[in-house]
Amino acid sequence: MGEPMLSADEALARLLEAAVPLGQTQTLAVDAALGRVLATPLVAGVDVPPVDRSAMDGYALRVADWSEGQPLPISQRITAGALPGPLVPGTAARIFTGAPIPEGADAVVMQEDCEMRAGQVWIRHAPRAGENLRRRGEDIRQGQVVLEAGQRLTPAHLGVAASVGTTQLTVYRRLRAAVFFTGNELALPGEPLRPGQIYNSNRATLTALLQGLGCEVSDLGIVPDDLEATVGALTAAARQADVVITSGGVSVGEEDHVKAAVERLGEIRLWKVAMKPGKPLVHGRVGEADFLGLPGNPVSAFVVFCLFVRPFLLRRMGGRVRPPLRFLVPAGFAWNKPSNRREFLRARLEEGRAVLYPNQSSGVLTSVAWADGLVDLDIGRTVEPGAPVPFLPLSEFTT
Ligand code: AMP
Ligand code: MG
């Protein structure tokens, strides 16, 4: 009917504006914090590395002590974890990777460039000052913010926290998501398919996407295409969750009751987005909960989740939201069907070119399972083979 179509960018901007970050935090061991959102910045209490260290197995020396063809006597042997004495002037120290540089040394020559005989070392080429030294604080300086609030913690972030000696991190509590799936035609895997039924695939996909994002998911199951049943499910879901997410029933057909149910219990904030797949997208509020209604088509639900729901949830979780990674790649296809909606095509990179899954129907979920990215085609765009097209890796969205 009369609702204006929003551009995908506008829809995302509105959604992000409406996403209120969680307040509540908890303290977790670093080991337990993978995927959580950091609530307070982490400030380094130490320099990393804490002292100058050797990057190589070799010999530490003072560059000024070297002259062509002259051996240096070895005055000490320094292993990783050892505490060296100052370097005796005019000598070299045998040193190993990760060992502290002795006071007075200003270079390490790797052992492959040295020759050892009778307690002396010949260094074949002129050493450079600073060679093979890992300087104190070259990674992290004491007092530096190493992890910003709002950072979603990946394995590397946990490693950085550990590298400054941190054992605990303050993170936001998990977001509670309640899901249900509308459609009289839906059957659960494990049940026999009666005539006219299809299996509920959105449950598996959306639950996994939500869990991957670190949400606690409660599933209210399959809800028939009936206004009162939808109102009932929505009421129960909104009572227990921060965010209610549904699939199906958001089109304009007479069997689509989700929008009416949200309007009955709360308010609708958003309706149609000029994109393909996935035109219908509902955002609303029901009681204290946000509501996000995804289209029923499995591909649409997936793409809408990635592009809209995920950033919304991330901000709700207290996270910083960045635009998804995208880069231009040459098209390995031609596209002669300009659309009045922005299109997100399921694609793969093959020999540096984006190739398309042959069936781009929004019902064909195998296209998403096959794809490693989405090609983002602007409204009205046609593509010649070899023309650059924006490619969005799917891995961004699924971790
Ligand atoms: P709807 O958005 O309810 O009009 O559904 C659009 C299409 O997606 C229809 O073909 C539905 O059968 C299908 N569909 C809806 N929900 C699901 C689901 N949970 N799993 C798989 N397909 C679905
Ligand atoms: Mg339906």
Image: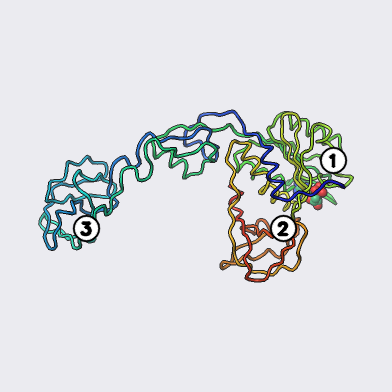
Amino acid of disc 2:
Glu
Q: Is residue 342 above or below residue 237?
A: below
Q: CA distance from mark 1 to mark 2?
A: 27 Å
Question: Could you say whether the residue bearing mark 2 is in a helix, strand or loop?
Answer: strand
User: Residue 229 at x, y = what percent?
Assistant: 84, 35
Q: Is residue 193 visible?
A: no
From the viewer's perspective, is the residue at label 3 or at label 1 nearer?
3
Tell me: 29 left or right of 258. left
The 10 Å Cα crowd at callout 3, few under 14, some 14 to 19, many 20 or more, is many
Question: Could you say whether the residue bearing mark 3 is in a helix, strand or loop?
Answer: loop
Q: CA distance from mark 3 to mark 2?
A: 58 Å
Most extreme residue toward the bottom is 385
Q: State which quadrant residue 184 falls in.
A: top right
Q: Which residue is tagged 2?
A: 343
Q: Which residue is tagged 3?
A: 127
Of the residues under marks 3 and 1, which one precedes in the sequence? 3
Q: Nearer the viewer, residue 204 or 274?
A: 274
Q: Which residue is tagged 1?
A: 257
User: Residue 240 at x, y = what percent?
Assistant: 70, 29
For disc 1, does the CB lie below 8 Å from ligand 2? Answer: no
Q: Nearer the viewer, residue 218 or 174?
A: 174
Of the residues under marks 1 and 2, which one precedes in the sequence? 1
Q: CA distance from mark 3 to mark 1?
A: 77 Å
Of the residues under marks 3 and 2, which one precedes in the sequence? 3
Q: Residue at x 17, y 49 (%)?
A: 93
